Amino acid sequence: MKRFVAIASLVVAASHAGAAVVTTVIDVPTSAGPQRILEARGDVVRAYIVSLAGGSGFYDIRLDGTMHTLAGACSPPVRNMFDFAAAGIAVVVVNATTYRVDEILAYLSTRHDVPAWITGGSSSTGVVASWAANLPLTVPLGVLEYSPDHVSPAIAASIRRPTLVIYHVDDDVSFGQELYDNLTAAPARQLVALSGGISIECGHHLFAGLDTQYVAATAGFIDAHNASLGGAAAGPAAVEYFNAGFGHYFLTADADEIAGLDAGAYNFAFVRTSKSFKVVDAPGANTVPVCRFFTTPGTFGAKSSHFYTANPAECDGLKLNPNWIYEKIAFHIAVPSNGACAAGTVPVYRAYNDGQTGAPNHRFTTDLATYQQFTTTLGWLPEGVAFCAPA
């Protein structure tokens, strides 16, 4: 029986994500010998991003978790692994593209029974495409290709998995449109063309200066298709968006609404933040219904907002408030007891903007550091644990 040994574990403070993330260096025994990976994960893991290095095809992962190659410094999934992990998407950095990716995926499934999303850029896109095309469809796997090199049309046409292709419009060594056009068997595919950023350092080829856009596009595609891959991660989720024009956050678990917003409803005013949490879509043991409200049109000028509550008294009171319109039961979820959530659930904190934008707005987050930031330095009012989401 193979033994999997974690060599080093570090708690790393990801300041830009505002959350603590555990990084672990692991030598995974495989039929080809020990294969090193670096795992970055938060408290909740609902999917894996498995990253293969472009360029030399080597990350050079050290025992302390550092990497001393250009791929380690510039690879978008690695550069943003703390943001992904804080959002429940663990990142696994595979030291070299020559590894037995199938055996590494099998190992990861023993750590967390969630879908994996294999990703690569530039010279590693062909390796990613080959694994995606040839692994059995029983393996819950999606595909994330960025700044792709030429990929064999035959291999691309053999990929029968949800596939995202991201490239930069000013990158003249990327073939994003070509790869996307050849993904004729993919059950779902999306092409994202980024623009702007900076041309120096990691450059347009690796989306320098565009981390927010890259993370949002990648996490959004995973959120949209993760459940279709199966595994423990399958199930409905409440997805968070941000409307920059209003300065408001918006949460929805409505699949049709999510699809519409992702497709550009309201002139693309709502952009995913990459944050979400699981919910229950029907009544069940230890769950309660969550009421959804919308501000009465015109009450706060051109601005509007939605509100969610699992408190029956709060729901009944708002139904009598002329400033709010009751819409529906949005989802079902567990609630805290004496401010604490039961084992197997994750606290969802609620913060109130105190009308700073000229209209009420609430943010619901599973990230305690984000909640603390908003309720201390940003002037939002703390309203405690509103829900207890499935882990």
Image (cartoon, rainbow, N blue to C red):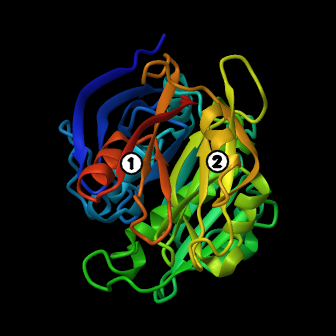
Residue 236, horizontal then vertical, whole percent: 70, 40
Real-space Cα separation, disc 2 to disc 1, in angstroms: 56 Å
Depicted 267 relative to depicted 160: above or below: below
Residue found at x 40% / y 57%: 53
| Image spot of residue 351 (x, y percent) | 42, 48
Looking at the picture, does residue 275 appear above or below residue 40?
below
Q: Amino acid at mark 2?
A: Leu
Residue 96, numbered label: 1
The answer to whether residue 135 is left or right of residue 61 is: right
If the image is split into quadrants, where does the C terminus sit?
top right
Q: Residue at x 63, y 77 (%)?
A: 268
- Closer to the chain start, of discs 2 and 1, is 1
Cβ atoms at labels 2 and 1 below 8 Å apart: no
Residue 244: give x, y in percent of width and height. 48, 75
**Residue 309 in view:** yes
Viewer-side residue, 148 vs 100? 148
Residue 11 circle label: none
Q: Kindly identify the amino acid type of the residue bearing the numbered disc 1.
A: Ala
Which mark identifies residue 318? 2
